[in-house]
Amino acid sequence: MVGAALAIEGRYATLWRRVVTPIALGLVALNLAWVPAAGWILRDFRPEALIVPGGRELLLRQQVPQRELIAIVNALAGTAAHVAIFGEPVGAELEGEPLYTHNWYSWPFHSALAGARSSGEVHAVLEKRAVDFILVEDGSLDDYPAMSGYLATEATLIASTPRARLYRNEPPRRP
């Protein structure tokens, strides 16, 4: 570190900048190209979202339509909401408690719902966790055989986006 500082301050400053700057820029480019998260996060980024009025909101509606549904939950129940989230874990703006079904976030919840074979068993799992709302992303119920039947008979659809639906668990359960 001391050597680098002296080189920058001394007579090698121009050489240092000519060598280190391209290497640093190359490493940044490789990081963006090869780090899996960079491609996932930036895969559908639209630069106009930075400069067009309303562009950010449009990009968010297109990329994370569940945020609109979470805003509805916040308006209806605020911090008292318990929301089962099927699909991407998108509970960042949720004022209440998210209950993720991805198995690495909540293995007991995931396995209990995946093991449920009837609407009654699904009801028992949701009631135990006091679930008020159920947010379902399209294609996220494959691991939960009884969930579709439960949603059709026991829950009330209150809002939907092109890729997700929000249900109220009727009646709201409390432990």
Image (cartoon, helix red, strand yellow):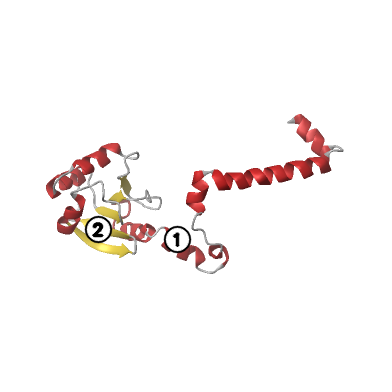
Secondary structure at badge 1 equals helix
Per the rendering, the mark at residue 167 is 2
* Residue 106 pos. (x, y %): 31, 39
Please state, as top left, top right, bottom left or bottom right, where the N terminus lies in the image.
top right
- Mark closer to the chain start, 2 or 1: 1
Q: Rounded to the nearest whole Å, what is the CA distance between mark 2 and mark 1?
A: 21 Å
**Residue occupying the far bottom of the picture:** 53
- Establish if 94 lies above or below 108: below
* Residue 11 pos. (x, y %): 87, 38
Disc 1 marks which residue? 60
Q: Residues within 10 Å of mark 2 (few under 14, many from 20)?
A: many
Secondary structure at badge 2 equals strand
Per the rendering, the mark at residue 42 is none
Q: Could you say which is closer to the camera, residue 124 or residue 24? A: 24
Residue at position x 19%, y 41% from top? 115
- Establish if 6 lies above or below 170: above
Residue at position x 24%, y 39% from top? 111
Q: Could you say which is closer to the camera, residue 50 or residue 44? A: 44
- Find residue 137 and report its image quarter: bottom left
- Find residue 31 and report its image quarter: top right
